[in-house]
């Protein structure tokens, strides 16, 4: 290698696209190119003759002496600088005749590269933790759909293994599953999509995400095994259906329609009555009156003690609705507090037939010949 020139670097290497720092055995700087000036903020005149260790202090146990070499094929060395940057230095001996009088160090700032490598390493670790511990299957696909990568603990519950899938094309493997094929095609065409599919006797919640352009992988997918959750959902739906059926039975039992004789029906109301339940009672009563062609419908309130004004209105509306069907509506067993609520409403009860007890109402039916 040629010796240093007076301009702070060898004449043939002054404008190399690297930082170039040259020092002698005592670590005194004898070369400092323009890029060194730009990167380290010192001119060649300021740097020349000073110790490189003072000009560019290191951390992490690094030592500029590690770059001293008499070999022309020395490898690169990473040094962490005190300013927080990391540099990769490649050193070559500077000879005067046969004697090595210094080293020329060519440096590249690798701080960003290291940060990217660390991020990639972290992403790799995160991916491995996820695919090795969660019931997922992660895949990447070439533009034609061929598997490039397959991994995931989710495969443990299937007959498939990554080595069986990589290099294969799922459009062929799952040709008999139209939904799965269409799902993959949409992803390869660039459409992000999500779908719950049934494959390998398992249920999967799957995402297909097209990869950015100019990548080896055209599509990335992740499938989460939701078989247990799907079974639990089905079980929950079955339970809810059972509860709904039971509630309908309870409502029917709590408001039975009794045909005491042909043409006369009685509906005893028991328990708490609110607007919602009153609406159901009205529907049930009117359906029964129409179906049985009843002439008299007796609404027995003996089993309830308190109603609000809205519910009282519903009860009276029920009797009016019975009349519209051509039957006579009778109220029995009104509790004093209910009577007070009805009076408070200011409803004109003219034309409403009311009896104190169900027995009296039935006697009324017998006496007036309401029986068919």
Image (spheres, helix red, strand yellow):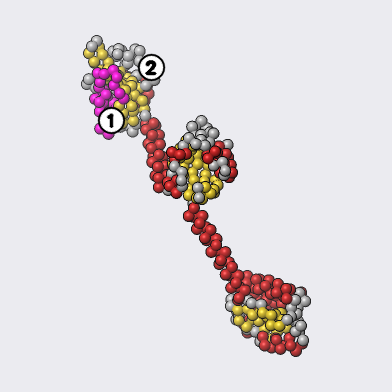
Q: Quadrant of the C terminus?
A: bottom right
Please, is residue 260 above or below residue 204 in the view?
below
Question: Circle 2 sits on which residue?
Answer: 15
Of residues 360 and 88, the one nearer the viewer is 360
Tally of numbered tags: 2
* Numbered range of the magenta stretch: 50-76
Name which of mark 1 and mark 2 comes first in the sequence: 2
Vertical position of residue 183 compared to residue 330: above or below:
above
Residue sticking out furthest to the top: 97
The residue carrying pointer 1 sits among few (fewer than 14), some (14 to 19) or many (20 or more) residues within 10 Å by Cα, namely: some
Q: Is residue 322 left or right of residue 241?
A: right
- The CA distance from mark 1 to mark 2 is 25 Å
Residue nearer the viewer, 85 or 242: 242
Mark 2 lies on a secondary structure that is loop
Q: Which residue is identified by label 1?
A: 58
**Image coords of residue 284 (percent x, y):** 67, 72
Residue at 59% across, 76% down? 272
| Residue 111 percent location from the top left of the image | 37, 31
- Residue 52, given in percent of the width and then of the height, sits at 27, 24
* Image quadrant assignment for residue 240: bottom right
Which residue is found at the position 46% from the left and 42% from the top?
138
């Amino acid at each position: 290698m040629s010796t240093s020139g007076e301009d702070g670097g060898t004449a043939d290497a002054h404008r190399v696209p690297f930082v170039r720092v040259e020092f002698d055995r005592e670590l005194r700087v004898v070369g400092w190119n323009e890029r060194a000036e730009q990167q380290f903020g010192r001119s060649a005149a300021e740097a020349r003759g000073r110790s490189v260790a003072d000009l560019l202090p290191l951390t992490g146990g690094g030592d500029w002496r590690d770059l001293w070499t008499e070999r022309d094929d020395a490898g690169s060395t990473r040094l962490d600088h005190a300013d927080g940057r990391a540099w990769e230095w490649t050193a070559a001996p500077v000879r005067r005749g046969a004697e090595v009088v210094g080293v020329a160090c060519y440096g590249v700032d690798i701080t960003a590269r290291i940060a990217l490598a660390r991020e990639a390493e972290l992403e790799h670790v995160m991916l491995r933790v996820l695919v090795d511990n969660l019931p997922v299957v992660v895949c990447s696909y070439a533009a034609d759909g061929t598997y490039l990568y397959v991994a995931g603990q989710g495969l443990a519950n299937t007959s498939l293994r990554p080595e069986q899938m990589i290099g294969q094309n799922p459009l062929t493997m799952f040709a008999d599953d139209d939904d799965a094929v269409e799902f993959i095609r949409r992803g390869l065409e660039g459409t992000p999509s999500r779908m719950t599919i049934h494959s390998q006797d398992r249920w999967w919640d799957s995402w297909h995400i097209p990869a950015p352009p100019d990548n080896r992988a055209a599509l990335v997918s992740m499938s989460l095994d939701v078989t247990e959750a799907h079974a639990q959902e089905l079980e929950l739906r079955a339970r809810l259906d059972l509860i709904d059926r039971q509630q309908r039975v309870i409502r029917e039992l709590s408001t039975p329609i009794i045909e005491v004789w042909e043409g006369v029906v009685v509906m005893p109301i028991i328990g708490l009555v609110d607007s919602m339940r009153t609406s159901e009672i009205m529907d049930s009563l009117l359906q029964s009156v129409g179906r049985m062609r009843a002439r008299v419908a007796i609404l027995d309130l003996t089993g309830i003690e308190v109603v609000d004004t809205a519910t009282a209105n519903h009860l009276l509306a029920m009797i009016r609705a019975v009349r519209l069907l051509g039957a006579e509506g009778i109220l029995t067993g009104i509790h004093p507090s209910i009577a007070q609520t009805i009076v408070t409403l200011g409803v004109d009860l003219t034309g409403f037939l009311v009896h104190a007890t169900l027995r009296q109402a039935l006697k009324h039916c017998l006496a007036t010949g309401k029986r068919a």
